[in-house]
Image (cartoon, grey):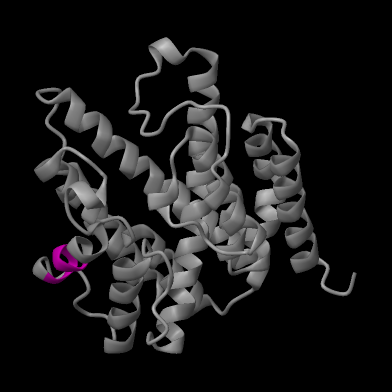
Amino acid sequence: MDSGQLNRLKKWFAEYVGGFYTGGQDAYLDKHIRLKEEHTARVCQEMRYILHGLKVRQADGLLAEAAALLHDVGRFEQFRRYRTYADPKSCDHGLLGCQVLCENGTLEGLDEPEKKILLDAVRWHGAKTVPSELEERSSYFCKLVRDADKLDVLGLLIDNFTRYYRDPKHFDLEVEFADEPFVSPDVLKAVFSGQLVDYRQIRTLHDAQMVLLGWVYDINFGPALVRILDKQYLDKIAAFLPETPEVRRAVEHIFTYVRSRLNPSH
């Protein structure tokens, strides 16, 4: 990919997303379209940070930024149709994103291998795990997008938790889980075993926070882990959790894992 091709994708994306705004006629829709547009911009920033640390060749860097730009392109139509971003309540936003790109001819002019990489990244960036059958190049770019996406979502959710605990009565977003003072045993067990938590096991807000800590098991690239530490995301999430011996051990387990990833010789 070259810079001209990336710029054309940026222009298409801005025009496509702009078509979802109602000019205030549907303020609820406008607000949620803007949320995802701003999320996309931040994921592109996080992608550039990761790429800088990896020192990839320019063409691959541009392709990775294109994958970040397009990763959530299905979210806009998803929300307009269903008024939710919850895939189980609506549709698979990754699959819908691929349909949007194909129906609009967005990737025309790119080489076939690049088209496949972008479609695979859009299709699978939100899956619990990257499918093992993906080709190596597709898997690589999909993992880049997953890391950049997680970096932004971590920051966003920390802000939301902070606002909720500061004034729960006036918190203006949906609270999906019970605000109970414990972490479920199944969630703790997954963290100690180094496994990603099945989201169906989440019962409480603290479960959800522990799941976020466990995301480090699914961070693929060193620069993304460094970014998480630099922004103190783990410390901030841990501060929300109850002070119990089991939770303290789980948090320390997470920190030990991250240190071993970044300093494998120690």
The x, y position of residue 5, in whole percent, is: 32, 71
In terms of secondary structure, what is the magenta stretch mainly?
helix
Question: Which residue lies at the image location 26% right of the left edge and 46% below the top edge?
Answer: 86
Q: Nearer the viewer, residue 215 or 60?
A: 215
The x, y position of residue 71, in whole percent, is: 34, 60
Query: Would you identify the image quadrant in which residue 105 lies?
Result: bottom left
Q: Nearer the viewer, residue 69 or 126?
A: 126
Question: Which residue lies at the image location 53% right of the left edge and 54% below the top edge?
Answer: 46
From the viewer's perspective, tell me whether residue 62 is left or right of residue 26: right
Q: Is residue 37 positioned above or below 63 on the image?
A: above
Which stretch is magenta?
Answer: 98-102
Query: Would you identify the image quadrant in which residue 168 lies?
Result: top left
Q: Quadrant of the N terminus?
A: bottom left
The x, y position of residue 232, in whole percent, is: 70, 41
Question: Which residue lies at the image location 41% right of the left edge and 48% below the top edge?
Answer: 41
Q: Nearer the viewer, residue 200 or 52?
A: 200
Question: Which residue lies at the image location 56% right of the left edge and 80% below the top edge?
Answer: 57
Q: Is residue 24 positioned above or below 100 on the image?
A: above
Q: Quadrant of the C terminus?
A: bottom right
The x, y position of residue 106, in whole percent, is: 19, 68
Q: Nearer the viewer, residue 109 or 21?
A: 21
Q: Is residue 199 positioned above or below 130 on the image?
A: above
From the viewer's perspective, tell me whether residue 238 is left or right of residue 3: right
Residue 101 drawn in magenta? yes
